[in-house]
Image (tube, grey):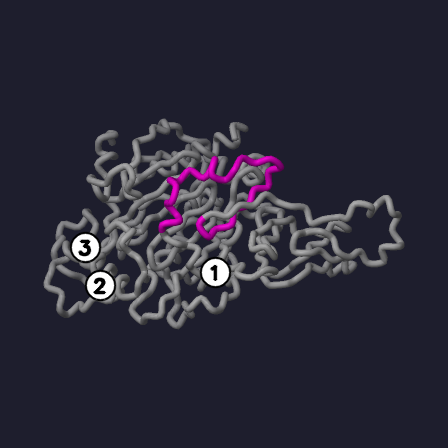
Amino acid sequence: MSKNVVESWQIDPNAGPDNLEAKQPFIDNGLDIYDPGRYYDPEFMAAEWDRVWTRSWLIAAIESDLPEPGDYSVFRIGRESILVVRQQNGSVKAMYNVCAHRGNQMVQNDRGSVMQFTCAFHSWQYGLDGRCTRISDKETFNPELVRQEPVLKPVHCETLAGLVFINLDDNPPPLMDRFGLPEGYLENYELDKMHCVRHVISEWHANWKTGVDAFYETYHLHAVHPETQDVMDDMGVQLDLYPHGGSRMLVPIGVKTKRQAEQDALNPSLQYMMAEAGMDVESFEGSARDVRPAIAQAKRERAKRLGLGYERFTQGQLTDSWATGVFPNTQIGLHPEGAFLMRFMPHPIDPEKFYYDTMTLVRPVDDPDYSVPGWMGLPEGTDTSGETRPDTEYVPSGEAPNLGLVLDQDSELLPVVQRGIRSKGFDGAIWGEQEQRLRHFHKELNRYLDGKK
């Protein structure tokens, strides 16, 4: 497929360079076909730990989970466990979740609130800033050993747009030097005003990159998720590549796929989306082609009534999914009403397993018509007020994560893909231009593995 065809995939051809919807310049990442061993080789997994996971900026928490001093969240990556803690001065600090005395992990739960951390092994205590405040029976230690008070070793930490990033490197570059997305891109959605209303971590029998690959393209929708064809144009997706491995796909929603010959008749799925936006479906006189702009207009009117400031959003932002990738392992489905934050977390020891870690974030609004898109799969009756942070749901390998039909279908597919990647008959992925985000991601991954970061 030619570059000209690729450039034609854009939501708004008239979007200027300062518009967040603007099409990004084409990036030629070559035509390499990579050795499939990267998806299952233990040595490749070890190299990723040494050169990628310990040197990248990783999303470790959301700030709304840490509203008060002493609130903490635990982030687990590979063999490490990191404490992310709200400080007395309102800042956020990250520390290794390990006591300086004998290496016991300080915290075993996912999150909580304390004014000091107490080790369950020998009762050593640490303040919110990680400084040791109490050594049990300190007089029995040689003064030379405890002359300088031990600490919970700090981890580099920065916040952006309501997200908390950490970096395990001893001397990492600033977050914004590696973030890649345009200034204000995430802030535009006001993620800092959203709260986690569901958190699910499910174990999948596949490599974490097998997961990234599947979620970074819509090419598979017609085959794996045929029900999406009534409400999503998988052939009109705008694909944009950014520096440092960042990328996105703007997926038109509220419109039929161009794969369908019939484009005018309304269908139940489109009618459901209209009702979800607060529209009176029975009085709608347009065709299926008119649904997407009508939904955008209905959302603008509702937002004006509720004082939500939707004037800052383009029409596409009000309807479409801005599936945005942050290197190395995150994709965020962005909507004004909420966001679906997914992290593809590597298994600590098995290169053919990963954890699909998803948070459904909702901006609480006191209005019965206001909700996140139905594709996020929130169970009926979910508390979306933001007043209570739900416990994390852990789903063992082999069980459907209950994240809605589409995501459950992916959980069934990926283990099959992983088994095929293992075959002697597979020489490596042949990526087309609908899969250009995959090539961009792997190109950046290789730069880290080559020691260029």
Is residue 178 one of those drawn in magenta? yes
Quote the CA–CA distance across marks 3 and 1: 32 Å
Closer-to-camera residue (373/167): 167
Q: Callout 3: 10 Å neighbours few (<14), some, many (20+)?
A: some
- Looking at the rendered structure, the secondary structure element under dot 3 is helix
Which numbered circle lies on residue 274?
2
Residue bounds of the magenta highlight:
161-188
Give the image quarter of residue 369.
Answer: bottom left
Question: Is 17 located above or below residue 307 in the figure?
Answer: above
Mark 1 sits on what residue?
199
Residue 379: x and y in percent read 39, 68
Q: Nearer the viewer, mark 2 or mark 3?
A: 3
Question: Is 39 located above or below residue 374 in the figure?
Answer: above
* Amino acid at the residue labelled 3: Pro
Relative side of 441 to 281, left or right: right
* Amino acid at the residue labelled 1: His
Mark 3 sits on what residue?
293
Q: Earlier in the sequence, mark 2 or mark 1?
A: 1
